[in-house]
Structures are given as structure tokens and as C-alpha cells.
Image (tube, rainbow, N blue to C red):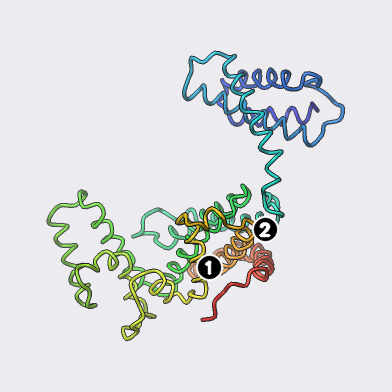
Amino acid sequence: MNQTIRDSLLSRLRSALPKEMFKEAKELFFQCYAQLFPNRSVIDDGSFSEEHLAHSITLMECCLCSVLFTLRYDQEEKPEEKAARVLRLYPIFIDYESTRLLSVPSQELRYFDPEIMILRAHIRYLEKINRPLAHVNPRVSLINDIFETIFRKASGSCQVLVLGLYSDSFVSWRTLHEAECIIKLLVEGGETVRQAYLDHIAYNNAYRNQEAFSKEELDSIFAEIKEKMHEHGLKSKDMKKFIEYGWLYASPLYDPSDVLFKLNFRDGVEKLAGLMRYSSIYEGASEIAHSSSAFFYANADFCRDISLAMTYQSMERMVQLYYEYMKVHFTFHPEQLACSKALGRDVQILARNLSSKVQMEEER
């Protein structure tokens, strides 16, 4: 094994374990390496193929797993049992990696592919700006809290794509779409809509966690809910959907004369947000999420392409909403805005390119 590569592998081993476990893990790695590669020296400055490097990394990860298993679950385990576990795990993962290519989509995504790295870089930069402003307290930092969750969700979608879980990423976009519709209404609707949203968070908390409130508090909250429901001609059976979606009545886009408006996502949130052109795509993702036959037979190439295109489109629009909401902040930090827009230019290029592959918007 090349000295530089050997040192790199051991560094990875060291960083993943408590200091006192490193020596044991190192010895386990070399012991198993010698058993698996008896004709190759641990220190070998000769040829070192890419395949052998991949196998060595897999072996190192199996050693990590075995040592951590002992540490967490069976501290009386003998050294030879740890080694036996490594030798059980290793061939399974090597066999999986060598046969996986037979069933994966034609264009497998890697973490360094621009379709992944460009968006993740922009998200990470925005997370860095947003995190100090998100206090996980809706009364204090509602919009920044929601953006924090959106950024994490989008970043997670990218990681899921790298794992080859393309249908999962498509389902993940479904949640991003819901979040986009909500954040759009909250940012563009101003303080009135945001206050209504906060009220309904409180209603939902009382509805679902009644044990945390006194009888007097619950009576007061539910009296307020019933009064507001009465104002909109709603009945007792409508309470649950009013609690979840009743804040939409505060939106300046709500039209009381619109008989097609409903307290649900599609005919309420999505409609007022002006994003119903994505309804059919949203429904397709829902089919997979609910484990219909689409879940078992979803075309991986299609799910990859649609996931990338929709995630890029949604994030591109939500970044513009973030700029709008953070206008005052960026006035005092123009260098942050300039850097974000520079990162965003690559996102825009990719968004246009990816969207051209997937023409599924409905005309609205």
C-alpha cells in the first residue's frame, strides 16, 4: 500500500474514533488487510490500482463498524470476534459495489458532479448566513426558521441523489414544493399573514397536545377557534382543516367569492401561491410516497431527472424569496449578497438546462 494512501486511510480511521480506540482499530485494519491481501505488503510503493484503493476504503469502513459495534453494544467481545465480523462484512459490500452497476441508472450521480455540488455549495453558503438568525422560536424567527429547514431539506435531497435513491429524492422534492408554497405566501403576504400563521401554530399545538394546557386555557383557545370558524361559515367537522389551513383567510390573495377555494393544499395553499402548474408533478411524487405501484416500479432515470429539475427550480425561486425577506440584512452585508448571487448564476444555468429535459408543467 502506498505510504501516502496508507496515512490517509489511517487519518480517516483516527478522526472517526475516540483516541483510545484508534490503536485497536489500526491493528484490526492491518490484521484483516494481511488476511485479505496476503500477497500485497502493507507498505508497497509499487502499483496501486483504483480498485484496490476502493477495496481498502471499504475494509477500513468495515473495521470502523466492528470497533464501534464493540464499543457501543458488546464491550466484552474478544478481538478475534471483531476481526471475524470485519471479514463477514467486507465481501458483502465488495460484492454489492461490483454488481450494483448492473441495476443503476445510466448516469449515476457522484458528489462532485456539478448537478450536486453547485446547488449544495449555494445552499451551504445561505445556511451560513441564515443559521445565526434562526432561533427555532416561531414568535421570534418564524421565516428564518422555515428557511433553515428548507435549506437542510434541499441539501439532504442532494445527498440522497448521490446514494442513488432517486425516487426518494423525488418524494423529498414534494416536501420542498409544499414548503415553497407556504414560504411564498408568508413572505409576500407580510406581517398579517405571518401573524395568522403563528396563531394557527398555537391552535395546532393546543389541538394535538391538550395535556400540556389547563382546562381554562383550552376552553379559551377552542372558543377563539370556533368563533373564527363561524365567521367563515365552517362547521365543527371542519375544525381540523381550519386549524391546519385557516391562516390562508388572512392572505390578500384570498377571494371569498371563489367557490373553488378549499382548506387543503392543492385548492388552498398551492392555488394562492400561484404554483398549481406543478400539481401533476406533485401528484406523481405523492404516488411514490404512498407506496402505490409507482413506488415499486418508478423509472430511476426519470426520477433522477425530475428530481434534479424540480429541486433546482424550487430552490432558485425560494432563494429570490430569501433575498426579498433579507433585504435589510443584505443592505448591511452587500458582500454576502454579491457572493450568493455569484453562486446563484451557476445554479440558474443548471436550472435552465435541467428543466429543458423535463417539460411537465401544466398550463395555468
Q: Quadrant of residue 87?
A: top right
Tell whether 46 sits left or right of 109. right
**Secondary element at tag 2:** helix
| Tag shown at residue 115 | 2
In this view, 181 is above or below 65: below
Q: Where is residue 352 in the image (x, y as percent from the top left)?
A: 67, 70
- At label 1, counting other C-alpha atoms closer than 10 Å, the crowd grade (few under 14, some 14-19, many 20 or more) is some
Tell whether 318 sits left or right of 52. left
Residue plotted at (62% across, 58% down): 304
The residue furthest left is 216
Tell whether 253 sits left or right of 355. left
- Of residues 122 and 279, which is closer to you in this image? 279
Q: Give the CA distance from mark 1 to mark 2.
A: 20 Å
Residue plotted at (65% across, 32% down): 12
As shown in the figure, which amino acid type bears the numbered disc 1? Answer: Ile
Locate the N terminus by quadrant.
top right
Q: In which quarter of the image is residue 60?
A: top right
Residue plotted at (64% across, 19% down): 28
Q: Where is residue 355 in the image (x, y as percent from the top left)?
A: 64, 69
> Which residue carries the number 1 mark?
281
Of pointers 1 and 2, the one earlier in the residue sequence = 2
